[in-house]
Image: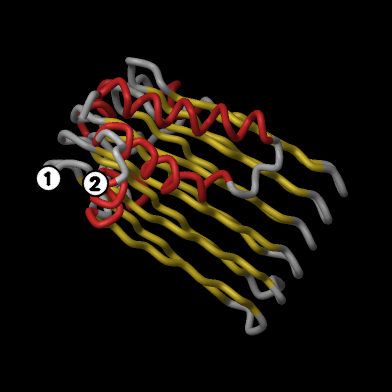
Amino acid sequence: MTDHLPTIRDEEWRYADAGVLKGLSPATFEAWHDIDVAEGETHRDCFVLNGGEPELRRIRARVAPGARLELFAVIAAQDYARVEVVVNLGEGAHFEFGGVTIGGGDAVREFVTRTDHGHPDATSNQTVRAVHWGQATGNFLGRIDVGRDGQRTDAAQSFKGLLLERGASANAKPELEIYADDVKCEHGAAIGQMDEQARYYMASRGIAPGAAQRLLTRAFIADAFMMLDDEAARERLLDLAVDTLAKAQL
């Protein structure tokens, strides 16, 4: 059992819900799900967090040389929910991550990733989209570590937040720590509101405001699942996310 329980004073928990953290049992923070992807293999997980109680999912993955790990997730929970992913990439391995946080109320929903590029020629791509309303918050904390042996690393992170009401918020904290000299690393973050010009255009074509908002939101979050080549799984994740918005009747 860990001697130190996380608090918002810890950098990786700085945007978490402090009240919820205090109420979780120590065992919750030890419940890691371990993934080992064998050399040359591909492992894919698609999952959803949409319950009414606080939920914490922690994943540790080792991706062997030439292997590929793909994780795609939607967080649409009604209470605090966090997906944390720690990945160690072997030579020539790839990590693909696509995530969406979406919802209202006053819940905090967050993705936290740490990717270790300690070997040459590994690649990673992370795309996170956040859509929130009410007093809700969507977070993405993504750290990429490139060791001295991580030559020819190619790593990218993209975060965009869409706030549908004034009280909602989003936080992004990308981190790069690079010790190799032949690398390509990039990250971008943007937070804004609905494109009113696009909404007006759709209204002028007879599309109801609610339907227009759902269509625009679907297009916004679709980027997170662009690299998911299973069409049925991709549509399932998109539909679930957009249904969360439809049920809110904004």
**Image position, residue 240 (x, y; %):** 46, 25
Q: Is residue 90 above or below residue 138?
A: below
Task: Determine the residue positioned at 39% across, 17% down.
Answer: 51
**Image position, residue 219 (x, y; %):** 44, 46
Disc 2 residue crowd, few under 14, some 14–19, many 20+, Cα 10 Å:
many
Report the side of 224 relative to 103 (left or right): right
| Screen quadrant of the C terminus | top left
Task: Determine the residue positioned at 49% across, 49% down.
Answer: 113
Q: Is residue 45 above or below residue 225?
A: above
* Residue 39 badge: none
Q: Secondary structure at mark 2?
A: strand
Report the side of 217 relative to 210 (left or right): right
Report the residue marked by disc 2.
163
Report the residue marked by disc 1.
166
Given residues 137 and 34, the one toward you in this image is: 137
**Image position, residue 162 (x, y; %):** 29, 48
**Image position, residue 200 (x, y; %):** 23, 50
Q: Quadrant of residue 60?
A: top right
Given residues 245 and 98, the one toward you in this image is: 245
Disc 1 residue crowd, few under 14, some 14–19, many 20+, Cα 10 Å:
few
Report the side of 193 relative to 230 (left or right): left
Q: Are marks 1 and 2 in contact (CB under 8 Å)?
A: yes
| Separation of marks 1 and 2 at Cα, in angstroms | 7 Å
Going by the numbered disc 1, the residue's amino acid type is Arg
Going by the numbered disc 2, the residue's amino acid type is Leu
